[in-house]
Image (cartoon, grey):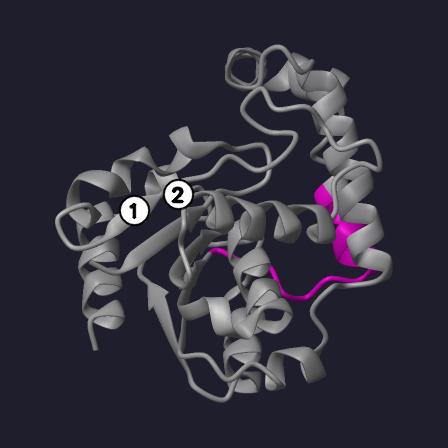
Amino acid sequence: MKSLILLHGALGSAAQLKGLLPELRDHFDVHVPILPGHGGKAIPEAGYSFVAFADFVLSYMDEQSIEKADFFGYSLGGYLALILAGKAPDRVGRIITLGTKFDWNTLSASREVKMLDPDTMEQKIPIFTEFLEVLHHPVPWRTMVQETASFILRLGEKPDLSAAELKAINHNCLLFVGEKDNSAGVEATRTAAMCIQNSEFRVLNDTPHPIEKVDISILCGSIVKFLKK
């Protein structure tokens, strides 16, 4: 049975992807590692970085005796999966991304960070901040949000995936984006898909960014079909 690694998004954890497991476990050996600094894991000393995330995933694969795996990445997880394809191409099979933002620059990063002010979040979305507190305990949710904001600003200043790096990826990729995803953006995702040599691009109708709003049956059916080609 092929190994499939699911990578969660920023501020998320394995719990973010649990809805996919019932339909995918019948077809694949599914793994859902929790990235450093998420789900109660300590934040790396140097802060969040794709270098730290990629090294962690490769170490996880070694520990689990996974020589090669297909990847599904949601949001940040999709970006990480593509970085892994460039860093360790022989260990990565097919890649599927969902809601992954590709148009990183100082302006787009600043827009994202505006939504990551702990005081404003606590005032406007207290239910979500309470959820973060439980999900990432014992790491303080405020610290995590601030580190995530710093990470995004650094990403805006120097994106880890340039157009040239996307063009160098030879893996079969499927890039999903929701029609109403104001974070990833339909056109930005389409442009990224055009850069990758062996890629497919699909829009999920009437779907915003949160994975909780995605039709899981349609998504899982597409994942199975694409990975079993």
Image-based side of 57 in relation to 2, left or right: right
Could you say whether the residue bearing mark 1 is in a helix, strand or loop? strand
Residue pointed to by mark 2: 211
Q: Residue at x 77, y 63 (%)?
A: 159
| Residue projecting furthest to the left | 26
Question: For this view, does 210 lie left or right of residue 216?
Answer: right
Q: Which residue is at a point 39% across and 29% down the rendered structure image? A: 15
Q: Which residue appears at 61% of the width and 24% of the height?
A: 41
Q: CA distance from mark 2 to mark 1?
A: 18 Å
Q: Amino acid at mark 2?
A: Ile
Q: Name the residue type under label 1.
A: Val
The answer to which of marks 2 and 1 sits earlier in the sequence is 1
- Name above or below for residue 73 compared with residue 87: above
In the image, residue 206 lies at what x, y percent? 33, 55
Image depth: mark 2 or mark 1 in front: 1
Q: Measured from the top left, where is residue 95 in percent x and y?
A: 42, 67
Q: Is residue 12 left or right of residue 178?
A: right
